[in-house]
Image (tube, rainbow, N blue to C red):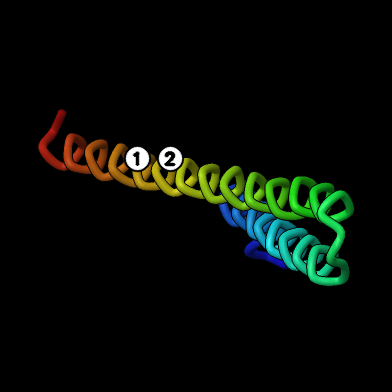
Amino acid sequence: MRRLRDPFAGSVFVLALMAVAGIVAIALGYRGIAATDDISIQIPFAVSGGLGGLGLLAFSGGLIGVQMRRKHAARERAEVERLIERLGG
């Protein structure tokens, strides 16, 4: 629980849960599609489960990428600041 106090770790944890929810939505959509041969019943499952789950996965994956870049940039800024301090700046 101590690691989740870090804003980066907390946000990545929530985004990972969103990604898992996307995978579950895709699985449930597939299950609904596989349960019937009627295309008029399959389309809502494909749209809500398949496309919705895929959208959720893409959204959470994109935000995880943004968070990783932000953390990398913060580390780089801190390193530059330490270097400037050591050089007497």
Instruction: Identify the residue position indicated by label 1 in the image.
Output: 73
The number of numbered badges drawn on the structure is 2
- Label 1 Cα neighbours within 10 Å, binned few <14 / some 14-19 / many ≥20: few
Residue ID at (87%, 59%):
38
Q: Secondary structure at mark 2?
A: helix
Up/down of 38 relative to 59, above or below: below
Pick the quarter of the image with the C terminus. Answer: top left
Q: Amino acid at mark 1?
A: Ala
Instruction: Identify the residue position indicated by label 2 in the image.
Output: 70
Q: Residue furthest top?
A: 89
In the image, residue 77 lies at what x, y percent? Answer: 30, 37
Pick the quarter of the image with the N terminus. Answer: bottom right
In the image, residue 4 lies at what x, y percent? Answer: 67, 59
Left or right? Give the position of 21 relative to 69: right
Residue ID at (38%, 40%):
74
Q: What whole-number distance in Å separates the C-alpha atoms at marks 2 and 1? A: 5 Å
Instruction: Tell me, yes or no, whether the two marked residues, 2 and 1, touch with CB atoms within 8 Å.
Output: yes
